[in-house]
Image: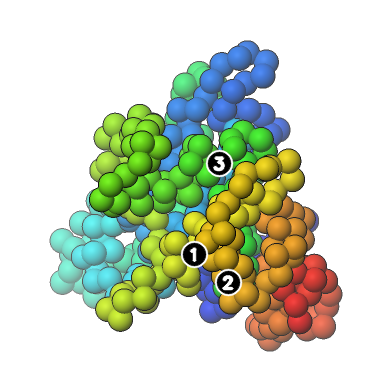
């Protein structure tokens, strides 16, 4: 039985969520169709463009993404404080960028601002939009509906494009967040579609590597080729350029840095992903000593053993259901939901505690 979304999303516990949507019948509606041989990779571009556009409107940052042939993954961070700080005019500007027709109702209320009822209606409408602009359900709805409509027009058909509601997992702590990001970024490599993060099209790790390559003073030939390849897919697209949205940044260690950032350095994450690729089953890529050492230090700081880390980035989807994190984080999550009457029993078994104990310790 499906669960109400308020049982799966609790911004008081964590702003980070892993979201997954699958195509109907898991058909290859976004990649190479094995029956017709037709390629639908341009729909993957649609998805990334739409994600980026919405990230520039919603109070939602994209931490990681991977668009596969029949599903896609998103790791999102909801910035509640940002949305609460917006002025009413800013909320109106953002919402009407998406739903221009809603401006008519607001305009009517504004014209009748001498009426207390009209003023109350205007205020309630703006606050409703503010709440929706920090809601991952509305974010995912705006992604999926737009792509489904475009795909159905292209196929000259009607009906479902997506299998059903998107799946969401609460990422309760730093361990779960970093593990899930790596799990998402390594999807094409685990599936055998690509060999290296640089070759993993339609993933956040490739996008991050491209932006890093462009900041290097003397880029290598491989970095130049990667940048050119990336430009062919995205930056020649007017919609992609217009969004202006970047992925959520890493911690730079600068005192003046905004508080909204991922809890590790970019280089540490790159080294960890590079080392992880070399240790995946069937991969025999060599990494230098410095990369191995950096990855080891990052795992030590996260208090995750190397074997447990590799197990987690391969089978993350099997171990956790509606929430992921250390055993204590999962138990606290369950207790808070019990106090809020979201679940009936505080001591009810929580799926994921046993593998979390093995992966992340007590």
Q: Indicate the quadrant where residue 188 lies.
A: top right
Q: Residues within 10 Å of mark 2 (few under 14, many from 20)?
A: some
In the displayed structure image, the side of residue 2 where residue 188 appears, left or right:
left
Q: Residues within 10 Å of mark 1 (few under 14, many from 20)?
A: some
Residue that carries the numbered disc 3 in the rendered image: 196
Task: Work out how far the residue at label 1 is from the one at label 3, CA to CA, in angstroms.
Answer: 17 Å
Where does the C terminus fall, quadrant-wise?
Answer: bottom right
Q: Secondary structure at mark 3?
A: loop
Q: Which label number is shown at residue 309?
A: none
Task: Work out how far the residue at label 2 is from the one at label 3, CA to CA, in angstroms.
Answer: 22 Å
Residue 117, x across and y down, in percent: 28, 72
Q: Secondary structure at mark 1?
A: helix
Q: Residues within 10 Å of mark 3 (few under 14, many from 20)?
A: some
Q: Indicate the quadrant where residue 309 lies.
A: bottom right
Residue that carries the numbered disc 1 in the rendered image: 268
Where does the N terminus fall, quadrant-wise?
Answer: bottom right
Q: Secondary structure at mark 2?
A: helix
* Proximity of marks 1 and 2: CB atoms separated by less than 8 Å: yes
> Which residue is found at the position 17% from the left and 69% from the top?
113
Q: Earlier in the sequence, mark 1 or mark 3?
A: 3
> Which residue is found at the position 28% from the left and 47% from the top?
218
In the displayed structure image, the side of residue 354 where residue 326 appears, left or right:
left
Q: Earlier in the sequence, mark 2 or mark 3?
A: 3
Task: Work out how far the residue at label 1 is from the one at label 2, CA to CA, in angstroms.
Answer: 9 Å
Q: How many marks?
A: 3
Q: Earlier in the sequence, mark 1 or mark 2?
A: 1
Depth check: 169 or 296 in front?
Answer: 296
């Amino acid at each position: 039985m499906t669960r109400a979304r308020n049982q799966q999303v609790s911004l008081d516990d964590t702003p980070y969520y892993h979201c997954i949507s699958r195509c109907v019948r898991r058909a290859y509606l976004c990649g190479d169709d094995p029956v017709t041989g037709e390629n639908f990779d341009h729909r993957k571009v649609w998805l990334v463009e739409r994600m980026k556009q919405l990230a520039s409107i919603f109070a939602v940052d994209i931490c990681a993404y991977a668009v596969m042939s029949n599903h896609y993954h998103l790791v999102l961070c909801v910035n509640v404080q940002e949305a609460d700080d917006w002025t009413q005019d800013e909320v109106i500007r953002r919402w009407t960028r998406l739903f221009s027709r809603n401006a008519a109702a607001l305009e009517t209320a504004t014209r009748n601002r001498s009426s207390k009822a009209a003023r109350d209606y205007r205020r309630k409408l703006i606050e409703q939009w503010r709440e929706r602009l920090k809601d991952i359900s509305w974010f995912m709805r705006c992604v999926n509906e737009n792509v489904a409509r475009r795909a159905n027009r292209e196929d000259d058909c009607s009906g479902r494009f997506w299998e059903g509601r998107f799946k969401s997992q609460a990422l309760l702590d730093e361990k779960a967040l970093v593990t899930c990001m790596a799990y998402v970024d390594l999807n094409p490599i685990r599936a055998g579609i690509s060999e290296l993060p640089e070759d993993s099209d339609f993933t956040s790790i490739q996008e991050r590597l491209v932006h890093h390559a462009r900041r290097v003073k003397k880029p290598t030939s491989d970095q130049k080729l990667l940048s050119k390849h990336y430009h062919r897919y995205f930056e020649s697209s007017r919609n992609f350029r217009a969004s202006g949205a970047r992925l959520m940044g890493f911690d730079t260690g600068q005192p003046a840095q905004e508080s909204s950032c991922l809890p590790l350095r970019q280089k540490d994450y790159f080294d960890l992903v590079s080392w992880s690729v070399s240790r995946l089953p069937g991969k025999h890529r060599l990494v230098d000593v410095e990369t191995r050492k950096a990855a080891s230090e990052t795992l030590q700081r996260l208090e995750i053993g190397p074997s447990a880390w590799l197990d987690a980035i391969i089978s993350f989807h099997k171990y956790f259901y509606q929430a992921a994190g250390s055993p204590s984080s999962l138990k606290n999550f369950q207790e808070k939901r019990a106090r809020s009457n979201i679940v009936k029993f505080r001591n009810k078994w929580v799926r994921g505690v046993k593998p979390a104990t093995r992966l992340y310790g007590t």
